[in-house]
Amino acid sequence: MGKHQIENKVRQLRFENGQMTQSGLADKVGVTRQTILSLEACRYSPSLELAFRIAQVFQVPLEEVFQYSEN
């Protein structure tokens, strides 16, 4: 089995939405800025609940924020 990774467009979406800060997004979804930083660097895979909350903030489908890949 290959390595699986969840990739995301969180950073891109933040900038497309008024250059939202990591702290601003963290406040909206109830996590720390460090969690958002780790998500953007693909060092952390979000819970399903957090993934949905982030997608709701940007008002886009979950698949537009997070993509699953097999390397």
Image (cartoon, grey):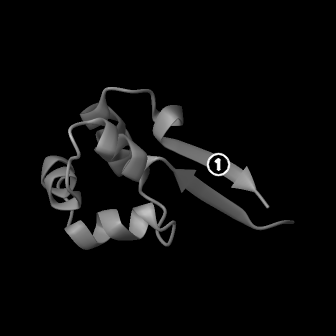
Query: Which of the pair 46/38 is nearer the observer?
Result: 38
Residue 5: quarter of image: bottom right
Q: Position of residue 57 (x, y in %)?
A: 25, 36
Point 49% across, 62% down: residue: 45
- Report the number of numbered marks: 1
Q: Left or right of 68: which side holds 71?
A: right
Mark 1 surroundings within 10 Å by alpha-carbon count, few (fewer than 14), some (14 through 19), many (20 or more): few
Which residue was labeled with disc 1? 68
Residue type indicated by callout 1: Tyr
Between 27 and 48, the one nearer to me in the picture: 27
Query: Seen in the image, is 68 located left or right of residue 35?
Result: right
**Residue farthest to the right, as pictured:** 1
Q: Position of residue 19 (x, y in %)?
A: 23, 46
Compared to residue 30, the image places residue 16 above or below, namely above
Place of residue 14 in the rendered image (x, y in percent of width and height, measured from the top left)? 30, 45
- In the rendered structure, the answer to whether residue 2 lies left or right of residue 51 reads right
Q: Quadrant of the N terminus?
A: bottom right
Tell me what residue is drawn at x 26 percent, y 36 percent: 17
| 57 lies above or below 36 | above
Left or right: 66 in relation to 24 = right
Q: Quadrant of the C terminus?
A: bottom right
Q: Secondary structure at mark 1?
A: strand
Residue at coordinates 59% horizontally, 56% vertically from top-left? 6
| As drawn, 59 above or below 47 | above
Residue plotted at (20% across, 38% down): 18
* Residue 13 in which image quadrant: top left
